[in-house]
Amino acid sequence: MSRVYNFSAGPAVLPESVLKQAADEMFEYRNSGMSVMEMSHRSTVYMDIIYEAEELFTKLMNIPSDYQVLFLQGGASLQFTMIPMNIMTANKKFDIIHTGLWTRKAIDDGAKLGTVNTIASSADRNFVYIPATDNLKPSKDADYLHICYNNTICGTKFTTLPDTGNIPIVADMSSCILSEEYDINRFGIIFAGAQKNIGPAGVTIVIIKKKLMKRAGKNLPAMLDFNVHAEKRSLYNTPPTYAIYIAKLVFEWLLNFGGVRAMEKQNRYKSSLLYDFIDNSKLFKGNVDREYRSLMNVTFSTGSKKMDTLFVKNAEKNALVNLAGHKSAGGLRASIYNAMPVEGVEKLIEFMKKFEMENL
């Protein structure tokens, strides 16, 4: 069977060249006599892998020297607890802009550790937009402001950031990291689960301003202390070694592509192709306000649950898979991450045209 076009929101599509290289190196990595899966994380050959991954990622994201990159475990969801434990230490309060399920989880976990102040929300319209940020007034005593930059389920993204003064912005970028250029200096922390735009599930990347790590108390469990992981360069305990190796291959692939700037150009082209078709369709309708549309997660529907189900079923027969919307949102969703080629989007549009003609 030939490969399908995989529109899954995560775990998600990986570059074919990366998969082929990993397959070639599965039995033996270079001249080590073993697979990466078998290596000690303390070995010189593996430390070269993880340190190179950190170096490549730093280059791709243009991360300043006053930030620390960490490869952690527990998924992005653990950061809903780990971040407040480490930096919500002065006033035991953080602000949040509530834009969907992932900020809901951050609110629930954060409330167990301190006060969470929702300063804006798009819940009134089922999260189909991002609240305006120009007139937001963060709490003067907030330890930080939490946002989910790209909302995988809803299909929205931030287009501007609020002016928070000295209050650091913490951004969940799990589904948009490396998809477009960001000014890292605007953020105190960026975190992302790898399984959408970086590699397989198992590793979470955290970019944290070093001075924020000084906020952590001395009684944190070691595995939940950013300082411990920073001191050991993500090797305090056994990391997800193979997931980090695949991430390194993806970073190399992206650099060879031309870096994040070149990828952003392609992502904007891919998303515009799909959104333009949806906007002019008589059957399909976009789910979110146009100015807040995600580049990565295109959400839409036919307006009929029965028709949506038929669309997903028939798409699978045409090697277009994982197009059903999240269970909490319904409808349809095409996640078009970096590794989704333009041809995949074109094939999807071709099928959508055919489906529309047959079902109107």
Image (spheres, rainbow, N blue to C red):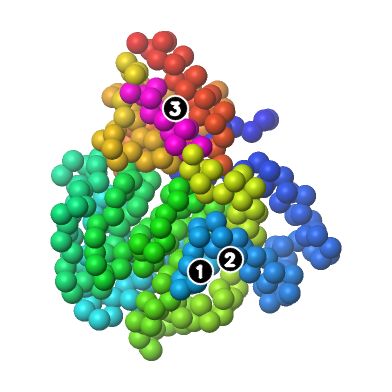
Type of amino acid under label 3 = Leu
Label for residue 69?
1
What amino acid is at disc 1? Answer: Val
SS for callout 1: strand
- Tell me: residue 183, above or below residue 13: below
Measured in 3D between alpha carbons, the distance from the residue under mark 2 to the one under mark 1, in whole angstroms, is 7 Å
Q: Kindly check if marks 2 and 1 are in contact, taking CB atoms under 8 A apart as contact.
A: yes
Residue 328: numbered disc: none
Report the quarter where the C terminus lies.
top left
Q: Is residue 108 left or right of residue 137?
A: right
Q: Is residue 342 magenta?
A: no
| Mark with earlier residue (3, 1) | 1
State the residue position of label 3.
273
First reached walking from the N terminus: tag 3 or tag 2 = 2
Residue 269 on the magenta segment: yes
- Classified by dominant secondary structure, the portion drawn in magenta counts as helix
Circle 2: residue type: Glu
Q: Which residues are magenta?
A: 266-279
Residue 54: image tag: 2
Q: Residue at x 45, y 58 (%)?
A: 192
Does residue 218 appear in the picture of this structure?
Answer: yes
Please indicate, yes or no, whether residue 197 appears anywhere in the rendered image: no
